[in-house]
Image (tube, rainbow, N blue to C red):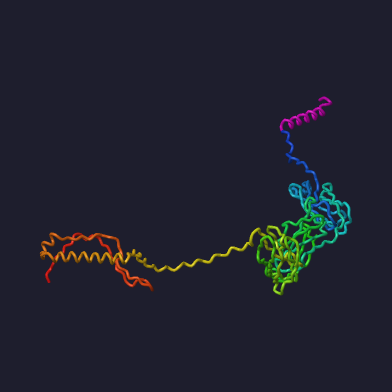
Amino acid sequence: MLPFAPWADRWLTAVLLSTALAWGAPIAAPAATSPVRAAAARSLTLDPSQGPPGSRVGVHGYGFDRCTTVGLAPEPRSAEAAEIQVTWEGDDNPSIVTADADGEFETDVTVASDAPEGSYEITALCTVNSKIKATAEFHVTPEPGPTALTLDPTEGAALTSVAVTGSGFDGCTADDGRAGTVTLTWDDGPLTEVTPAEVTVDGGAFTAQFAVPSDADAADHTVTATCVGYEQVSAEQQFTVTAVPGPQPEMTLDPPSLPIGGGSVAISGSGFNCPEVALSWDGEQWDTVAPAEGGTFDTEFEVTPDTGEASYTVRAACTDDPGVGTEAAFTVTAGGPVTPTPTPPTPTPPPTPTPTPTPDPTPDTVPVGLVVGSSLLGAALLALAGSALLSRLHRGPRWVHDHVSSRLRPAPTATDVAEPSETGPPTRSVRLEPHPDPGDQTLTKEDP
């Protein structure tokens, strides 16, 4: 065998083995990896970004999604959010918080009560990775003056209207540096009758108005004004409820109007529980009057002759509390005074009258001479006819029936005879009454 045979055998064996491995086993693919998510920009926002010592500051963090812990033993496990420390510059007592899946968190810090005016940093630091952090700047403003609250009036009955004035609320701000608002409470309970509904602070001051609760006891009560979101900025004042509401003031004018030319008008008032009442005409005071013990008064005033035709306002109000008062309208007219329209009485139905019989029509009278003359003439004619009849032979009934007939004719009613009386109406009269035609009548003579 040749001298290089052993070396050649070993070389050939290595080549054949390499070829077998290359062709026999496939090349393994690289292990799959999770897609890499781009990290969000880390930042902090402060709300508010400035304020006096003692202010509470809201902190909102972004981009802290990589502040996590990953365990490798005994076996791999999913990442968990790590703690984040939010610290006020120079403060050793940080606020601890963790970020959500989006890398965001919210917390708050309090400005040191003795912090001088100036700018300070608020820092958010991941406890497992010091490279994950963010800072923001907060400006401390000068310490505001003491808060104060005034009430006008400071005492009164239930339902009394009270004016409220607050000052020293410079540290009361809202989100984004906007003006803050305050709430008013009555003995730690909400006040519902507040005007305006939202009390806004302007330049550290505010004004409002409320009504004393109708169910308030006669005692001392506490009215408190508190900044919304900054409860440490507040002020309070005492209000004394004296008694339940008394009668409302009333006033009447008599008369309520006068014609042009002037005159006197009487005024009567009641419900004025105050030492003095001011009287005014169209806003101009002309007199005062002291009510009696029961809150009543009576007085009068003169309307000048040169007062023009118009409607005027007469007002009566307590001098120590102008809100307690009332008013009435007075009218100067061109004609007579305006009087109220009386209410007509309810009509009473009249009794049913008893029907009165219609008197008979007064008959037409005939002169007595005419009646007497006619009667005498008729009597004479009858006498002549009788004598002529007697002078003739007596006729039987048949002859009479054949030769004698009579017929009544209708005629208007007439009085033939009347008896006049000088002291009164006639005592008797004779009246002929016409009747319908009875037809032909037959006279029959009968012997006795």
Q: Nearer the viewer, residue 177 or 441?
A: 441
Q: Report which quarter residue 54 is drawn in.
A: bottom right
Q: Is residue 325 above or below residue 129?
A: below
Q: Which residues make up the magenta segment?
A: 1-24
Percent position of residue 446, x then y: 12, 68
Percent position of residue 71, x then y: 77, 49
Percent position of residue 166, x then y: 80, 60
At 81% from the left edge and 46% from the top edge, which residue is drawn? 43
Q: Nearer the viewer, residue 12 or 365?
A: 365
Q: Is residue 400 above or below residue 179?
A: below
Asked if the magenta segment contains residue 4, the reply would be yes
Q: Is residue 364 visible?
A: yes
Q: Main secondary structure of the magenta part?
A: helix
Q: Is residue 97 visible?
A: no
Asked if the magenta segment contains residue 25, the reply would be no
Q: Is residue 310 above or below residue 300?
A: above
Q: Nearer the viewer, residue 251 or 216?
A: 251
Q: Quadrant of the C terminus?
A: bottom left
Q: Quadrant of the N terminus?
A: top right
